Amino acid sequence: MIDQNLLESLSSSDKESFARGLKELITQTYEVEKEFVELKALFEEVLDILPTVVWALEQEGEIFYQNSLASEIPEILEKLDLQNTNRQEIEVESKVYLVQTNQKLNKYIISATDITHEKRRERLASMGQISAHLAHEIRNPVGSVALLASTLLKRVDIKNKTLVLEIKKSIWRVERIVKATLLFSKGVQIHKSEIIPQNIQNEIQESLNYYTYSKNINFIFRFDDEVFEADFDLLCIVLQNFLFNAIDAIEESDEEEGVVEIEYHKNPKEVIFKIYDNGKPIENPQILFEPFKSTKLKGNGLGLALSLQIIEAHNGKIRLLEENKKGFEIRLPQNI
């Protein structure tokens, strides 16, 4: 409060100067306050844009500030140890967050970054290494068993021939899993060549002789005659994977008979494969191409993950079809 006696002692000109100075001070105070509010709003907007979860907590743990991401994941705070200043990894709803806690101006500043993809890559790399090692260990004894089965098939009597053929089918499936595991762990290298569609069809039909299923399934092939470019062996693996998945879906369904349709068409820019079946609907489509995860009774969870890897190596795409008929669409770009 200004002293009244001091004001009365001032001359008229001093009073005017004082009033002008006071007015300017009030104006500057308002401007500073306005700039502060604008900067605060800009700061909060920047924090909301960041892909990082941010909190500022009082010493008692009450929230002083949180950005929009933080308000969506309060579970992180529930699991956080505030006294631990080291980085903490906290899992919430199948996601992993790297959380860092610091103390500034009597407040806890907490940031959490989603590292789910990094952890997934680490896990897959580790699983891939283990799987590759196991595949190498299995390959030699399986080769020996396959050789013995072939020899046995030539010498066995007619009544036991069916049993040996079933053994050969099982060996073929094991060899296929080993090959898929090694391909996935080492990475796919494609070698394109000109392919006659009929050769692809023949290879797929031949593989049916080695796959075991109990229901009556009608396989329908609709293939154009136009040649195209791709890696023949790898494309066969992809189409066989989708074919066997279709068979498994029919086996697990309530249908007494099954239908699998495989189509091939070519246009000036790309070739398109479509595989349909009337089997069991797909569960959890979000993990469909996730390695080592499977919703089927059969399989090791690598088939579709490897298929995606092979098609992407061709710069192609795979799409789940659910509109009229259940199935998949594969598109491969062409340069010829």
Image: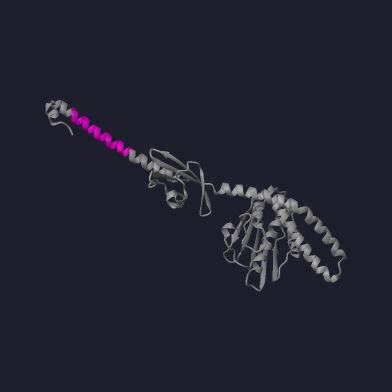
The tally of labels here is 0
Frontmost residue, 217 versus 323: 217
Q: Which quadrant holds residue 34?
A: top left
Query: Residue at point 59% right, 49% down?
Result: 120
* 90 shown above or below 9: below
Q: Position of residue 316 (x, y in %)?
A: 64, 52
Q: Is residue 18 left or right of residue 177?
A: left
The chosen color scheme is: one colour
Q: Is residue 18 magenta?
A: yes
Can residue 249 be seen here?
yes
Residue furthest to the right in view is 155
Query: Residue at point 85% right, 63% down?
Result: 152
Residue furthest to the front in view is 83
Query: Residue at point 70% right, 65% down?
Result: 221
Which of the image's four quarters has the N terminus?
Answer: top left
Q: Is residue 254 magenta?
A: no
Q: Which quadrant holds residue 254?
A: bottom right
Q: Which quadrant holds residue 31?
A: top left
* 272 shown above or below 25: below
For the stretch drawn in magenta, the main secondary structure is: helix
Frontmost residue, 238 versus 251: 251
Q: Position of residue 53 (x, y in %)?
A: 46, 46
Q: Position of residue 238 (x, y in %)?
A: 68, 57
Can residue 198 be seen here?
no
Q: Is residue 310 left or right of residue 48?
A: right
* 194 shown above or below 1: below
Query: Residue at point 13% right, 31% down?
Result: 4
The boundaries of the magenta stretch are: 17-35
